[in-house]
Image (cartoon, rainbow, N blue to C red):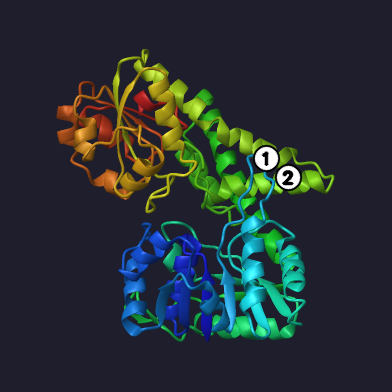
Amino acid sequence: MRVSIIGCEHVGLVTGCCLAYIGHTVTCVDRASETIEKLKNGVLPLYEPHLNEMMDHGRREGSLTFSDDAPGAIRGADVILLCIDVRTSEDGEPDFSSLESVARLIAAEAGSHRLIVARSTMPVQTGERLREMLAVYGRRKELSFSVAANPQFLREGTAVDDFLHADRILLGIEDSKSEQLLRELYGPLIDRSFRCPLHKAACASAIPTVLVTSVRSAELIKHVSNAYLAMKISYANLISDLCDRLGGDITEVSRAMGHDPRIGPAFLEAGLGFGGYRLPRDLRSLIKLAERMGLPSCLFKEIERVNSRRVDVFMEKIRRALWIIKDKQIGVLGLSFKPDTDDVRSSPSISLIQRLVGEGAKVKAFDPEARASTQALHAEIHQGASPYDVAEGSEALIIATAWKEFRQLDWERILRSMARPLIIDGRNLLNPDQMRTLGFEYYRSGRTERNAQSS
């Protein structure tokens, strides 16, 4: 199929590169000329494991192109996937101006019927708005359009794997023709007929479940799924606070909870809380939607409130360990909101650093991949050249992002270089017994200092 992707941010790039890999002819367009120029030269504007390999394959085979010619891409497409952001205000109100511009362009350039698919997470009822805009702008040419919702379930850091080995594919459609086209689009994933680039063999993962719903249900499914995942994180953090007070161990408690098949282990990690762009945004959108519908939003608000307090809770742990923060040199390992991504939007690590600096600390930070994105958005943050550079002379070393690389550091070298060998682990990444055996003072989330010292 000839597929046009509108929007070359994370969702658009992963979707476009993977669709090209499984056999379609894909054109990715974006109005940011600098981004398109980078992509034409084989340079990704973001970090995502395996994505560079996928892009190189598509460019080499001629199945993937990047362009700023949106009209041409629209005219030549069988299916148009919208991977653009519908921005929301701080209180969750959506701004549909970018979507309206795209709808106007599609109506002007399409010469015949087109299927328009909302691929990015968009507010509930976006499909109706999009259908109305296409009808208005396409009226003079007597064009009709089909609108579908195909929300992605791509996690930053594992997005390529999530796409190629999806456990479910959600199709929100309004007619049988749209369903047929989307089943054809995802056919190689559904029947597992492609050679997996991650395992260098025919794909042997389980066949994904294809869920067919209405457009509005598909929009709602994505939002409520993200809100539920956010709730699991906030729940784990509340239990972590209980463990701190009562002498329990959150890793033991969450591990036991996760063995219950009704609960599952995913998203029960306690620590600094969730960040990034999607979970906080989707939670705010759901709060706004519930209020607009006259329904109570107290549960969603409490999830958000618990998460917003995580940095406060962790700051208290730092104060108990350091006593005085002012003028202390503190190293921070991790800037991205989660490992395997360079995304620092709404990162708890960034918030923590800003709080520490606000209380007079001298902070130096390091991240394996988020150096450039941090420099672009938070140039005031002092970044070190390596974890060892950050640790040298520090009176505390904070682990703020659970990069696996941090487990593999030469911790004996770090011990010798620190002014005080104190580690405060905000992600429960390291083994407490091993770190204390080496000679570190070691504190983590969800375990009282008294209980920790006695282990």
Q: Position of residue 333 (x, y in %)?
A: 32, 37
Distance of mark 2 from mark 1, alpha carbons?
A: 7 Å
User: Do the residues bearing badges 2 and 1 touch, measured as CB atoms within 8 Å?
Assistant: yes
Compared to residue 362, the image places residue 214 above or below, namely below
Q: Which residue is the extreme one toward the front?
A: 140
Q: Where is residue 410 in the image (x, y as percent from the top left)?
A: 18, 40
Q: Is mark 2 on a helix, strand or loop?
A: helix
Asked whether 10 or 183 is in front, the reply is 10
Q: Mark 2 points at which residue?
A: 288
Compared to residue 414, the image places residue 29 above or below, namely below
Q: Mark 1 points at which residue?
A: 91
- Mark seen at residue 271: none
Asked whether 401 or 58 is in front, the reply is 58
Left or right side of 77 for 332: left
Q: Position of residue 53 (x, y in %)?
A: 32, 71
**For the residue marked with disc 1, what is the amino acid?**
Asp
Q: In which quarter of the image is residue 235?
A: top right
Compared to residue 140, the image places residue 278 above or below, namely above
Q: Is mark 1 on a helix, strand or loop?
A: loop
Determine the residue positioned at 24% across, 25% down. 394
Determine the residue positioned at 73% across, 81% down. 141
**For the residue marked with disc 2, what is the amino acid?**
Lys
Determine the residue positioned at 28% across, 36% down. 383
Mark 1 Cα-neighbour bin, 10 Å: few <14, some 14–19, many ≥20: few
